[in-house]
Amino acid sequence: MEIGVHTPPLADEPLESALPYLHELGVGAIEPGVGGHPGQDHVARAEYLDDETEQAELRDLLDEYEMRISALAIHNNPLHPDDDRADQADTELREAIRLAGQLDVDAVTCFSGLPAGSPSGEVPNWITAPWPPEHAEALDYQWDLAVEYWAEIDGLADEHGVDIAIEMHPNMLVYEPHGMARLREETGDRIGANFDPSHLYWQGISVTDAIRYLGEREAIHHFHAKDTRIYEEQAREKGVLDTTAYDDEINRSWLFRSVGYGHDESHWKDIVSTLRLVGYDGALSIEHEDSLTSGREGLEKAIDLLDRAIFETQPGEAYWAE
């Protein structure tokens, strides 16, 4: 395993200065955005796509700092009911897959997307209950669209030797492990999870159980190291489906936190151990979205904790079992 960083918190500086900073901290992988919500400050998609010279320069820069790209990030909504927005997201995703193949990057991280609830709908519709019955019908409609779309993307990803790592996220069709497993089963093996525990904590999902569930299905393609703290005083009054603005921290039921500030070090060691149990040995890509601290401080504290938690070597022989 190795510590990685999703690089948007360092968007105010070029990759040429971000890489030595991360290298000094012991980071071995980056997950740069190439469009969509993460932006593309460090790896502009059009600049590198189909350009062997630019790609070679990027590889040289990464090699200089003993760094690799664990995934290209392109989080957006290719199932959006607005055709223009859906087309843009689809183009970005397809180009990201092509670029990942050209750069020998294993995965593209993204969202499942979310359609409207009917062909005439204009706004994405996140359905969380099957009643009244029209909601169940709308959910069936959404899944039909999603399966058709992601089956096609699975084929494209396979052509380029790239895994599609979907982040289970609220306000997206796939937001929990059973939905993730269903999408994989109904589309293809290139479709899997960018396992981000932060969105599972506030839903009441056991993260280690979810890792086992998806790991048994070989469905974890990438991992985000990101924490969440539930604030019980607020949750007891209004639950965890909280629409309070993220920057109104004191009134929210939960907040994204730096690794170790939502759950302690022993919990993160359990996560690392469970990932190893199910065969995941890739990057733990730190995603900083903690509004109570700066990007650099949040990254550095997360790196410090994960450095003590990760396994850097392969297991030896279990001599004690002979």
Image (cartoon, rainbow, N blue to C red):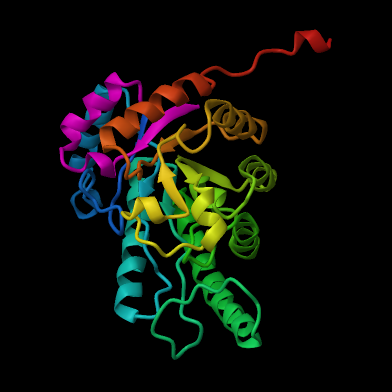
Query: Could you say where residue 102 lies in the image, as x and y percent from the top left?
Result: 34, 46
Instruction: Check the image and report above or below for 90 versus 290.
Output: below
Residue that appears at 17% across and 30% down: 17
Residue that appears at 30% across and 43% down: 32
Query: Could you say where residue 67 lies in the image, as x and y percent from the top left?
Result: 32, 28
Q: Nearer the viewer, residue 204 or 111?
A: 204
Instruction: Check the image and report above or below for 283 versus 65.
Output: below
Q: Nearer the viewer, residue 30 or 164?
A: 30
- Count the marks: 0
The quadrant in which residue 226 appears is top left
The quadrant in which residue 181 appears is bottom right
Residue that appears at 25% across and 53% down: 39
Q: Nearer the viewer, residue 313 or 236?
A: 236
Query: What range of the chain is rendered magenta?
Result: 1-27
Q: Does the magenta segment cover residue 307?
A: no
Query: Could you say where residue 255 lies in the image, as x and y percent from the top left?
Result: 43, 48
Instruction: Check the image and report above or below for 77 versus 233.
Output: below
Q: Is residue 138 left or right of residue 248?
A: right
Is residue 216 visible to us here? yes
The quadrant in which residue 61 appears is top left
Residue that appears at 38% across and 40% down: 104
